Each structure stands twice: as C-alpha cells, then as structure tokens.
Image: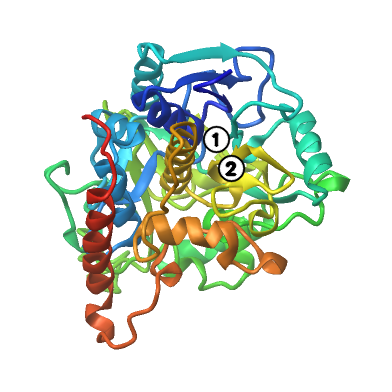
Amino acid sequence: MANHVHIIGGGLAGSEAAWQLAQRGVRVTLSEMRGGGGETPAHQSDGLAELVCSNSFRSDDDTKNAVGLLHHEMRRLDSLVMRAGEVARVPAGSAMAVDRDVFSAEVEKALQDHPNVTIKREVVSQLPEDGLTIVATGPLTAASLAQSIVGVTGEDRLAFFDAIAPIIHRDSINMDKCWIQSRWDKTTAASNEDGDYINCPMTKEQYLAFHQGLMDAEKGEFKQWEADTPYFDGCMPIEVMAERGVETLRYGPMKGVGLDNPYDTNEEFPQGRWPYAVVQLRQDNKLGTLWNMVGFQTKMKYGAQVELLRTIPGLENAEFARLGGMHRNTFINSPVVLDRQLRMNAAPHIRFAGQITGCEGYVESSAVGLMAGMMAATQLAGGEWQAPPRTSAMGALLAHITGDAKAASFQPMNVNFGLFPPLHSVHKKQRKEAYTNRAKEDFGNWLAEREMVPA
C-alpha cells in the first residue's frame, strides 16, 4: 500500500514514530498486542506508551546534560512524547518526571484522534514479508516475533534483566522521621516549595543492618535459560549493587551528600549535616499520592521486600502500590543487523526503533522512534534522508546504534557525552556546556535545511 507504514509496538518508540509519520501525511497502522490477546510480565495496562520501570525522563537540563539536550532536540521536532510529558509533568527537581497514567492517556488520545492513524489491538507473530514496517516492540518483544527476527537476521538475540522499583503510598510515610528536599537544593519552576524528594535518613548502624538484610534476603530464582543473562548497569537491582561492596550503595542511590539532615542535632545522628546514608523517594503521579523509591530496583521476593523495606526509617508502616520486580529484556545487535537508517540489512523494508535497537531509556527510545518515523516519511516522499549532525544528541545516539559501537561487545546505552565527537581542546569544567552549545548550533542548522513539520 503506497503512503502507508505498519508499526508493530505501541510503546514510546512506536507511538512517537506513528505521530511523526501521521503529522507528515502518511497513513499509519499501529499494532499493539496488549488488549489484543498479548501480554507482558511487566506492563500493568493496555495503554499506549505505558511507563514500566520508572516515571522519570531524567535530567531536563539542556545546557550541561546529554539527556536534557535530547529533550531539547525532540521538542524542536514536535515530539509527541515530550508534548504529553509536559501535560503529565510532576515535580522532580531538575529532572523531568510524569504521572504515568496521565502520560499514557495523552499519547493514546493524540493518536486515536489523528485521522492518519489506525490503532489495532493484535498480536503480530511474524515479520511482514513486504510493505514499509517499523518494529518497535521494545525489550518485551513477544517470543514468537523475537524468533522470527532471529530467523531473518541469523543473529542470536541478546538479553538482559531489567528490575522495577517499588512504589509507596504517600500517606503511609512517617514524615516525623523524613524530610522533603532536593539534593543541593536544585529545583525548577515545577518543583514543590521545599524540594522534590522525600529523604529517609540512616545512621551507620542502620545502614549496615540494611545492607546485611539485602545480602540475606530471599531473591527470585532464575530459570535455566535465564541463568547467564547479564544485567544492564542502568537498572541494576539494589541487592546486586550491595554484593559489590558494603560502601557501594552509599556512593550510589543511598548517598547522603547535598542533603541537610534536620535531625542532625539528635543524638541518633552524630555525624553532622549530611546523613550517613539516605533513601530517596520521588513523586510518581500528579496527585502526589504515589512515590517511587529512587534506584531501588529489586529482584527480592515480595515478602522479603516488604519486611526489609519497612526497616527504613519513615517506612515502618509503608503501604506499597507496587512492589519491585524484574523482567527479561531483548535487543538486537544493531551494528550488525541494521544499516545507518535503522533498516534491517536482510530485509530493508523493515526498520527497527526504540529499546529493541539497544538504546536504553524512555527518552532515547522515543528519540529513535522519532527518527525512524522521519526516515520512513522521507523515503515515501522520494527524498534523501540526512541524519542529524553527529555532534547532536540524536545524531550521536543514532550513530552509536547503527555502526559506531563495537558489535562484539554491544550493550544497551543511554545517551551521554561519551558518544559525541570529543572536544579535548576545551577545559574539562566547561566541556559539557561546550558540547551542548555546539550541538544546538549544528542541530539548528540541520533543521533550517529541512522542511519542518507544522506545529
């Protein structure tokens, strides 16, 4: 069918690709298996663009942060994910976090209302033999489709485990033992008055007991076929971090620096201004009734989670809206399987987008979906695709996925300045800002040469 693209997968990448194509006048069929006879071990609903692991899009600072720069570039390209994110935004300091339900509903409504988009709730088990297609099934790709991909590519699929952090009801947190503050008091216009994180402080003795509890807690057992699957560092379970050393958590998600402990005059906290260790919770919905445990992804069994997490000061009576869990993620060896336009070398009518390509993170997944949609629209229009400049966040991420990474050691990757062409001549303290300044100028020039999508 001319002027038509079939998108398989209604997550962030598939939804973003559908939006970009539809906005350019291309008819889209978006197939999503949830609600059509398919399910995953991690999703809670059949809503499009459901956020599974966290509600954070991470830093929104586009001057010194690579993911914030990616936000900036996506906004300039009329990203649906960033549009919906603004509507669903909740306070999170200098980060961008959203109400999961509001976000998903905004994305789904935008696509349902678009005259060029048809949403089908169906399971797609095989790669289509013809017709322009974008596969954006994400890290939870159905086994039948994954096997079809392996059959076409001839490459073994790669996999890792992704762990989910618990979510707690706000009114069950004892604020007589906790306080609200953002680290180093960093806030934004969307911030709450006092800050954006609930902080649960620990003494040295409490921390050491908690660490030992993590080591001793009952963990979920691996199936035989899962035993050798590696973790991705960005979603490392809290107990796996604990196994790396007794101090690891204090220099990771439980670091106390930058937080003014209001209880430091109490004999229980003799160490002074900063707590020995701290557990932070971040608002998870607009109402502020749900808060998630920052960096506390876990594979502990449910009973063990409740028992141990309630030893954290302030969480003695915590009620959990969702306990932590883990699921198996799947991605392809993109530097080998795909060309520079995300097309499958063995079947060029098929593009891949999102986390299945080996990018990691909500925003990165959406950005790759955005580019896949633009690429397909350009192809249908008979034009020649010009990739975003290598110096931009989108260009650096795309280049890494489609050939710059070493295929033999390819692993999921967040956007970061290590993917950008280096600026060794710039002093280290000014380098991050230099990266973003260069990126914005080059990206702006690239946009000026393109026909922009109407707002």
The local crowd at label 2, few if under 14, some if 14 to 19, many if 20 or more residues have their Cα within 10 Å, is many
Mark 1 or mark 2, which is nearer the start of the sequence? 2
Nearer the observer, 255 or 81: 81
- Asked whether residue 15 is in view, the answer is yes
Position of 30 with respect to 98 (left or right) is right
Residue 318 appears at what percent x and percent y?
43, 35
Residue occupying the point 49% across, 22% down: 3
Q: Quadrant of residue 171?
A: top left
Which quarter of the figure is the C terminus placed in? top left
Mark 2–mark 1 CB contact (< 8 Å): yes
For the point 79% across and 34% down, the residue is 148
Residue 362 in the image: state x and y as whole percent. Answer: 45, 43
Tell me residue 22's x, y (percent): 39, 23
Give the residue type at disc 2. Answer: Gln
- The residue nearer to you, when weighing 116 against 367, is 116
Give percent across and percent down for residue 180: 23, 48
Residue under numbered circle 1:
323
Query: Label 1 sits on what residue type?
Result: Leu
In this image, 8 relative to 192: left or right? Answer: right
Tally of marks: 2
Residue assigned mark 2: 305
